[in-house]
Image (cartoon, rainbow, N blue to C red):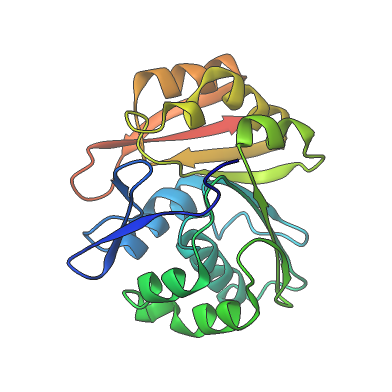
């Protein structure tokens, strides 16, 4: 891959914007609250947490979703590690992640623990979190993955800017790598995304989105 690392610009000095996709990494209206609304609540977390729970994600970005999930896992008093696998084509440099995450002091203790060990891609043993970030095009790496997720965070860039990460074939792979009774959630309510999830075998529901987004999508696999 010719361009393997994220290229960034900074909006107002605090919000990273992908130069590859011309899209911000998180909501300028409190990205952490959006993460908790869309990806945690959208997957009925932390209520569904159980030993060995496995979250998978399309688009690691700044790591904010992982940090929010890790904090929720620890605060729920779960025993053993949370497993978290993310697929990312253009990993962000750790220094850029650190700068971006300064906007979220509520997860600072988790960010500090993560950044102290993180090398930019691959695996990372954080004790109560077992992280793996698989670098490359998810359309090729996800079919080769042998895992099964209990919950998916579908957090690619906007479907209008990054349609490859929302195409029907990839949604079918998400379903194929979802445990029975598993779920997926995303901030987008784009019709073709919802139809792709339905075609893959998910029961899809449109629910209220966060902030200015009227709707989002949650999906459950029978």
User: Would you identify the image quadrant in which residue 156 lies?
Assistant: top left
Q: Would you say 6 lies left or right of 134 here? A: left
Name the residue at 58% across, 69% down.
70
Left or right of residue 213, residue 184 in this image: right
Foreground residue, 163 or 7?
7
Left or right, residue 113 beside residue 106: right
Residue 65 at what x, y percent from top left? 48, 59
Q: Nearer the viewer, residue 94 or 184?
A: 94
Please tell me how many numbered marks the rendered image carries: 0
Percent of width and height locating residue 90: 52, 49
Percent x, y of residue 129: 69, 70
Q: Is residue 14 above or below residue 148?
A: below
Q: Is residue 1 visible?
A: yes
User: In the rendered image, which quarter contains the N terminus?
Assistant: top right
88, above or below 186, in the image = below
- Where is the C terminus found, in terms of image quarters? top right
Residue 179, position as x, y percentages in the image:
73, 38
Q: Is residue 104 left or right of residue 169?
A: left
Residue that lies at the very extreme toward the right in this rendered image: 146
Say if 177 sits above or below 54 in the image. above
Q: Nearer the viewer, residue 170 or 209?
A: 170
Residue 222 in sight here: no
State the residue at coordinates (35%, 36%).
158
């Amino acid at each position: 891959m010719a361009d393997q690392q994220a290229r960034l610009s900074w909006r107002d000095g605090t919000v990273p914007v992908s130069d590859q996709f011309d899209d911000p990494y998180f909501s300028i209206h409190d990205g952490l609250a959006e993460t908790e609304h869309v990806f945690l609540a959208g997957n009925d977390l932390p209520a569904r947490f159980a030993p060995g729970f496995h979250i998978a994600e399309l688009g690691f970005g700044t790591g904010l979703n992982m940090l929010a999930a890790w904090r929720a896992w620890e605060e729920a008093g779960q025993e053993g590690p949370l497993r978290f696998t993310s697929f990312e084509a253009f990993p962000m440099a750790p220094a850029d992640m650190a700068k971006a995450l300064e906007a979220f002091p509520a997860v600072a203790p988790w960010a500090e623990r993560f950044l102290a060990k993180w090398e930019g891609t691959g695996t990372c043993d954080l004790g109560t979190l077992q992280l793996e970030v698989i670098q490359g095009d998810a359309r090729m790496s996800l079919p080769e993955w042998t895992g099964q997720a209990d919950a998916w965070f579908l957090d690619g860039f906007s479907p209008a800017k990054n349609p490859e990460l929302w195409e029907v074939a990839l949604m079918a792979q998400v379903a194929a790598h979802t445990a029975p009774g598993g779920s997926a959630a995303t901030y987008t309510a784009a019709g073709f995304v919802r139809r792709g999830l339905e075609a893959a075998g998910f029961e899809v529901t449109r629910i209220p989105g966060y902030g200015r987004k009227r709707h989002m999508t949650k999906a459950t696999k029978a």
